[in-house]
Amino acid sequence: MAPRGRKRKAEAAMVAAAEKREKLADSGEGMEEATVVIEHCTSRVYGRNAAALSQALRLEVPELPVKVNPTKPRRGSFEVTLLRPDGSSAELWTGIKKGPPRKLKFPEPQEVVEELKKYLS
């Protein structure tokens, strides 16, 4: 039997992922203001909660941009992160380790707004 070679598709995917990470890192360097990032799984339930949360954040702090899923989200994730202009980040909420029941994964919007105000002041 002939020896098998490496799979080129897997290697190409690794290179593409590395380039994507570099591109995201480069785009974040020029930030002049803080940004709130909401990462949520693409399930319908997660999307509804993310929409309600982003709306609450935009109402409370209108000058702060809110991005929802700027990159492909992880499976089962629901996280809210504050990205600071200096490149550091602060986790406002993570629901990855919470549950069951599933409703524990999602924060009350007011909780996240209060946490955000702590980091901004």
Image (cartoon, rainbow, N blue to C red):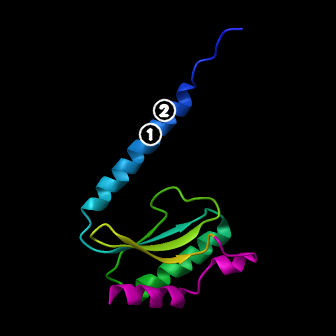
- The disc placed on residue 109 is none
Q: Are marks 2 and 1 in contact (CB under 8 Å)?
A: yes
Q: Main secondary structure of the magenta part?
A: helix
Q: Quadrant of the image for the C terminus?
A: bottom left
Amino acid at circle 2: Ala
List x then y, in percent, for residue 25.
Answer: 34, 55
Would you call the spot at circle 2 few (<14 residues within 10 Å), some (14-19), or many (20 or more)? few
Q: Quadrant of the image for the N terminus?
A: top right
List x then y, in percent, for residue 42.
Answer: 61, 62
Residue plotted at (45% across, 83% down): 57
Q: Quadrant of residue 117?
A: bottom left
Q: Does the magenta portion include 117? A: yes
**Dot 1 lies on which element?**
helix
- The disc placed on residue 12 is 2
Q: Is residue 45 above or below residue 120?
A: above
Q: Which residue is mark 1?
A: 16
List x then y, in percent, for residue 59.
Answer: 42, 87
